Amino acid sequence: MTIGRTISGQSLSPAEESFNISLRPKSLNECIGQQNVREKLAIAIEAAQHRSEPLEHILFYGPPGLGKTTLAHVVANEMGATIRCSSGPALAKAGDVMGLLSNVNTGDVLFIDEVHRLSTPVEEFIYPAMEDFKVDYTVDSGLHAKTINFPLRRFTLVGATTRAGLLSAPLRSRFGMLYHLEFYSTEELTEILNRSAQLLSLQCQDGTLELIAACSRGTPRVANRLLKRVRDYAQVKGSGVLEAGVVENALKMEQIDRLGLDELDRAFLRALVNVYDGGPAGIEAIAATLGEERDTLEDVVEPYLLQIGFLRRTKRGREVTQQACRHLGMKLRRKRSADSQPNLFERDVP
């Protein structure tokens, strides 16, 4: 169900990625939002340039779609460095990492997405690379095995993760700068959409970009995806100009409401109300009810529902809020106490 979600913050397909890359800012001055992070990065970059040395290792963490990959490319551009990209699942063994590290030049940026998914052997292999810029690589095996010490050029490792809690403490401690990315405000998303519309040569009536921004779940990636969908709809069903009616009809066709909830979000909330009487309910139980993966619900659905106050996480499980029920037009059923439960083993007396 989630593969084709327009408002998912998950990674893009190659075609969508090429669309998104063209909209990505190239420098810190072009970036919108994340003011605190940008200020800290600007100071660190300028200081490193004054000392003519690479930046410290950086970790960006936060929900998907907030600009972690974009900031990694911006850091490389600001430093005038080459960026080499990979991901945690792609680095399965030490040899995979060795291939990357051996081609890194002084000052280059090595970007690893989903860094929390590095295997333990690979993670331990890169510890000395991050600290001492050298690695001990074992060649052959058994009686013929020998360890070769490879010196490396000084580089900057930029890690990105949606689940910082899954990073081991030793790996986390080796990053000199850790930055958490927050959701964007509607005003910031409107600025981002305005910039994207100009790059795409789109004509927009007043207020249309605000409509899209309000449905973008605080996420620039979602905002740009919605802009692309609305653009397509406007070209086929309208005159090509983004008008209020065209935007509303396009969002309605995508089953996205005024708060940015799609059918999976509403199914999640409805399951809590109808099946579990509003909760609390365990995430595994909800995932089984919906036929979805637990990780999908935790990484894609829950962050936004928590942010807007439609969901509560408790020790006993997930609970829906009255605010969510009002939005869905539903009412919570009263839970019966244990004393009021019918005794199934008692026969009715005529």
Image: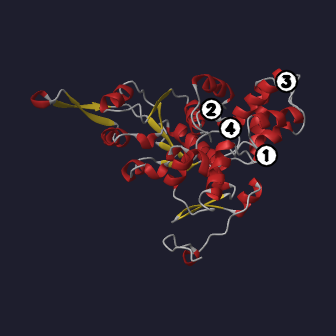
Residue found at x 32% / y 41%: 128
Residue 272: which quarter of the image? bottom right
- Between disc 4 and disc 1, the foreground one is 1
Q: Which mark is residue 258?
A: 1
Residue found at x 66% / y 53%: 270
- Residue that numbered label 4 is attached to: 222
- Asked whether, in this view, residue 313 is left or right of residue 256, the answer is left
Mark 2 packing: few (<14 Cα in 10 Å), some, or many (20+)?
few
- Between disc 4 and disc 2, the foreground one is 2
Marks 1/3: CA–CA distance = 21 Å
- Residue that numbered label 2 is attached to: 4
- Identified by mark 4, the residue type is Val
Marks 3/4: CA–CA distance = 22 Å
Marks 2/1: CA–CA distance = 20 Å
Q: Which mark is residue 237?
A: 3
Residue 271 at x, y percent in the picture = 62, 53
Q: On screen, 44 above or below 19?
A: below
Residue 283 at x, y percent in the picture = 52, 54
Q: On screen, 128 above or below 235?
A: below
The disc, 4 or 2, on the residue closer to the chain's N-terminal end is 2
Identify which residue, 270 or 75, lies in the foreground: 270
Mark 3 packing: few (<14 Cα in 10 Å), some, or many (20+)?
few
Identify which residue, 241 or 187, lies in the foreground: 241
Is the residue under label 3 in contact with that under label 2 (CB below 8 Å)?
no
- Identified by mark 1, the residue type is Arg
- Asked whether, in this view, residue 218 is left or right of residue 146, the answer is right
